[in-house]
Image (cartoon, coloured by chain):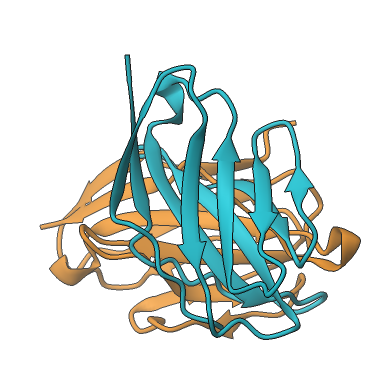
């Protein structure tokens, strides 16, 4: 799986958009970009994933650059409950075969009033 | 639906004792996983199961065993606990809908071995 680089921490004011960057310059053509988050003491929570097109769901948007070497997770209106560690994971996706997720150190997002 | 449930929420265990951590999912996912998370470290895979009746070793399997008798349950057993197994344990399951295997995690079991 490709290595990812994320800033260790970020701050965001409540109600503003939180833009979390991730570099994955060695990504392969068949590797997806996944985002998970972990709120203190809870299990990791899936947010979104994509291959090369931008994706949006009820939680967030994922913007992947055309060369796929970096991506940005966007929380459009951050709330205090979005304070968490956010993990960007790049991996080949498997069907029918279990495969581990490799969590790096992630970005600790602090949402403030 | 409940998703993934784990029991117990937390446990203090004497070294040398055995214990089974329970994990149940109601999403009919084929694959299930056990991870451990230690302070300052990321999640590490202990064991996994592609489907009922099959299991496999992850990156840190020593001291742990698993079974997968049916789709819903994936218990993790520590036969003789040691202090280095003090950790938070997360169970996960994944589907392969739309050609990707998104993993969903349970709330975790905090285990302290003394």
Quarter of the figure that contains the N terminus of chain B: top right
For residue A25, side relative to residue A96 (left or right): left
Disc tally is 0
Residue A75, compared with residue A65, is above or below; it is: above
The relative height of residue A47 versus residue B79 in the rendered view (above or below) is above
Q: Colour of chain A?
A: cyan
Q: Which residue extends farthest top?
A: A113
Q: Quadrant location of residue A30?
A: bottom right
Q: Nearer the viewer, residue B87 or A44?
A: A44
Q: Nearer the viewer, residue B81 or B31?
A: B31
* B97 or A27, nearer to the observer: A27
Above or below for A24 versus A107 = below
Q: Is residue B73 visible?
A: no
Q: Position of residue A76 (x, y in %)?
A: 59, 29
Instruction: In the displayed orientation, state which residue is furthest to the right.
Output: B98
Look at 82% across and 75% down and name the residue there.
A95
Chain B: its colour in the image is: orange
Q: Residue at x 56, y 83 (%)?
A: A1
Q: Is residue A9 visible?
A: yes
Q: Position of residue B84 (x, y in %)?
A: 18, 70
* Left or right: B81, with B114 as reference point: right
Q: Position of residue A31 (x, y in %)?
A: 69, 78
The residue furthest left is B114
């Amino acid at each position: 799986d490709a290595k990812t680089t994320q800033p260790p921490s970020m701050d965001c004011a409540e109600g503003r958009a939180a833009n979390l960057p991730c570099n994955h310059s060695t990504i392969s053509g068949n590797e997806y970009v996944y985002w998970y988050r972990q709120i203190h003491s809870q299990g990791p929570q899936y947010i979104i994933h994509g291959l090369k097109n931008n994706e949006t769901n009820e939680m967030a948007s994922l913007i992947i650059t055309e060369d796929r070497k970096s991506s940005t997770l966007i929380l459009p209106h951050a709330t205090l409950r979005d304070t968490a560690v956010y993990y960007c994971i790049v991996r080949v996706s498997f069907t029918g075969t279990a495969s581990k997720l490799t969590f790096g150190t992630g970005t600790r997002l602090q949402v403030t009033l | 639906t409940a998703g993934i449930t784990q029991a117990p929420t937390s446990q203090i265990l004497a070294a040398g004792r055995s214990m089974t951590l329970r994990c149940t999912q109601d999403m009919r996912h084929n694959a299930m996983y056990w991870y451990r998370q230690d302070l300052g470290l990321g999640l590490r895979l202990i064991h996994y199961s592609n489907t009922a009746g099959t299991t496999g070793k992850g990156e840190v399997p020593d001291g742990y065993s698993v079974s997968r008798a049916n789709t819903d349950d994936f218990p993790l057993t520590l036969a003789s606990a040691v202090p280095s197994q003090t950790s938070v344990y997360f169970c996960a399951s994944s589907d392969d809908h739309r050609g990707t295997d998104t993993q969903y995690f349970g709330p975790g079991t905090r285990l302290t071995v003394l």
